[in-house]
Image (cartoon, rainbow, N blue to C red):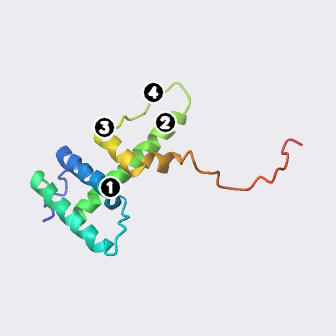
Amino acid sequence: MESNDKTAHTKLAQFELMVDFMEEHPQLAKGQLKTSNAKASANILWKRLMEDLNSCAQPTRDVAGWKRVWADYKNHLKAKMRRNKQSNSNTGDGPSRYQHFTPVEERVIQLMSIDEAVSGSSNSERFGSVDCGVDHNM
C-alpha cells in the first residue's frame, strides 16, 4: 500500500485529519495507551487512521508509513522549536530567523507538550548539584 513515489508529500488535509484523530486519542499520539491489550488497541487505531488517511488523498501508505510520518512530523516540530529558541537567544544586528508555526503545527505542539520538551518545564526543579547553603560570595 506504500506509495511508489518516494517523493510523494503528505497533503495538508491528511495532516489535519491525522491531528484531529490524535487529539481524539492522545494516548495513541504519545505512544502511551494504558489498556490491558495496549498493543492490539494501538494497532486497531492505527489501522483505522490509515484507512481514513488513504481515503482522504494521495499518497497512500501502510500503517508503518503513517507511523513514520507522525514521528517525522513531531521531530520536525521539535527541531523547528529548537532553532527558534536558539534564534531568540542570539544577539546582534542580523535578521531574525524565527519561523512561525502553522495552526496544525500549533495543535501538535500543544497536544504533545513539545514546548516543554524543548524549553523545559517551568514547574520542574533544577537538575544538577545540590546547593547545601554554602555562601559562594565568600
Residue on which disc 1 sits: 72
- Tag 3: residue type? Thr
Residue on which disc 2 sits: 87
Disc with the residue nearer the chain's start (3 vs 2):
2
Tell me the quadrant of the picture where the C terminus can be found: top right
Disc with the residue nearer the chain's start (1 vs 4):
1
Q: Does residue 120 appear to the left or right of 37 in the view shown?
A: right
Which residue corresponds to the image point at 27% horizontal and 70% vertical from the top-left? 41
The residues tagged by marks 2 and 1 sit, at their Cα atoms, a distance apart of 22 Å
Disc with the residue nearer the chain's start (1 vs 3):
1
Query: Which mark, residue 102?
Result: 3
Which residue corresponds to the image point at 54% horizontal and 34% vertical from the top-left? 90
- Tag 4: residue type? Pro
Q: Nearer the viewer, mark 4 or mark 3?
A: 3
Provide residue 61's location: percent of width, then percent of height: 17, 61
Question: Element at badge 4?
Answer: loop
Rendering quarter of residue 40 = bottom left
For disc 1, the neighbor class at 10 Å (few under 14, some 14 to 19, many from 20) is: few
Question: Element at badge 3?
Answer: loop
Question: Element at badge 1?
Answer: helix
The residues tagged by marks 3 and 2 sit, at their Cα atoms, a distance apart of 18 Å
For disc 3, the neighbor class at 10 Å (few under 14, some 14 to 19, many from 20) is: few
Furthest-right residue in this view: 138
Q: Nearer the viewer, mark 3 or mark 2?
A: 3
Residue on which disc 4 sits: 95
Which residue corresponds to the image point at 48% horizontal and 51% vertical from the top-left? 117
Comparing 86 with 45, the one in front is 45
Q: Is residue 57 visible?
A: no
The residues tagged by marks 4 and 3 sit, at their Cα atoms, a distance apart of 21 Å
- Tag 2: residue type? Ser
Furthest-top residue in this view: 93
